[in-house]
Image (tube, rainbow, N blue to C red):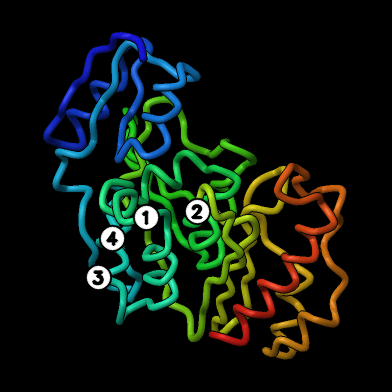
Amino acid sequence: MYDFELVKPKTLREAVAALQAEDAQALGGGQTLLPTMKARLAMAEQFVALSGIDEIKGVCLDDDGRICIGGGTTHATVARECAESYPALASLAGRIGDPAVRNRGTIGGSIANNDPSACYPAGALGSNATIMAEGPNGTREIAADDFFLGMFTTALEEGEIVSEVKFPVPERARYEKFIQPASRFPLVAAFVAKFSDGVRVAITGASSSGVFRWTEAEEALSADWSPDAVKGLTAPDAGEMISDLHGDGAYRAHLVKVMTARAVAAA
């Protein structure tokens, strides 16, 4: 790990201002960034620690009944605070990594990083969440459909911070994942959510393009909310799936069907 300067702002505006410095980078819980830095695969001259900013922590409800989670809220807090209001999201958060990761990692950091195997992007996309981004030009609202642009790529602009994520609460929902034992990341996972106006299905861990909506499953489940509706579908194109030592594209495509059907059955 190389030498760097660590800035510890106490407010969101201070953090945004600090990120305008040349070669500055935000540091949330550090569960992805710090191991990368230790391996000398990432570096910046200045890191802006977000852990001391109380205004981006916590869970509440807005006037529209959405669950609003501050970007600096840890996975453990989400698991605890959303257990009754949004059990599927709480279950997702409660199964990320191990206790150490859950007590340090944050929802904002996970969503901003957009690892192709991360859990939260599936929860946000499957829930039709809205991501609030705070930057030098103020606050932007970004729909989840427009936020996740590809592997490790999002709609965040330079110097912006995920300040809050707003989740509509569906009628029924569930997150199911097939875990890669060494990393605890999902090899493939599915988040399904049934709303009054339709169904959303988000898949993580499978595609070389990152998290995606499986629209064929959404259409089938909107007509028939049952595992059988999923089992009758053709699996996604194996050529678009990740292929590595843990499983080839065909295996992951098959798991997309399996995990989606399991999620529907358990919702």
Q: According to the image, label 4 marks what residue?
A: 76
Q: CA distance from mark 1 to mark 3?
A: 18 Å
Q: Quadrant of residue 93?
A: bottom left
Q: Dots 3 and 4: beta carbons under 8 Å?
A: no
Q: Which of 182 and 209 lies nearest the eye of the viewer?
A: 182
Residue 204 sits in quarter: bottom right
Residue at image mark 1: 98
Residue placed under numbered mark 2 in the picture: 184
Q: Nearer the viewer, mark 1 or mark 3?
A: 1
Pointer 1 or 3: first along the chain? 3
From the image, which quarter does the C terminus lie in? bottom right
Q: Which label lies toward us, 1 or 4?
A: 1
The three-letter code of the residue at mark 2 reads Arg
Q: Residue 40 at what x, y percent from top left?
A: 45, 16
In the image shown, does 97 or 126 lie closer to the viewer? 97
Q: Residue 43 at x, y = what percent?
A: 41, 16
Question: Type of residue at label 4?
Answer: Ala
Q: Residues within 10 Å of mark 2 (few under 14, many from 20)?
A: some
Q: Secondary structure at mark 4?
A: helix
When the figure is inspected, residue 176 is found, relative to residue 74, above or below; the finding is below
Give how far across and how far down residue 191 sits, in percent: 57, 69
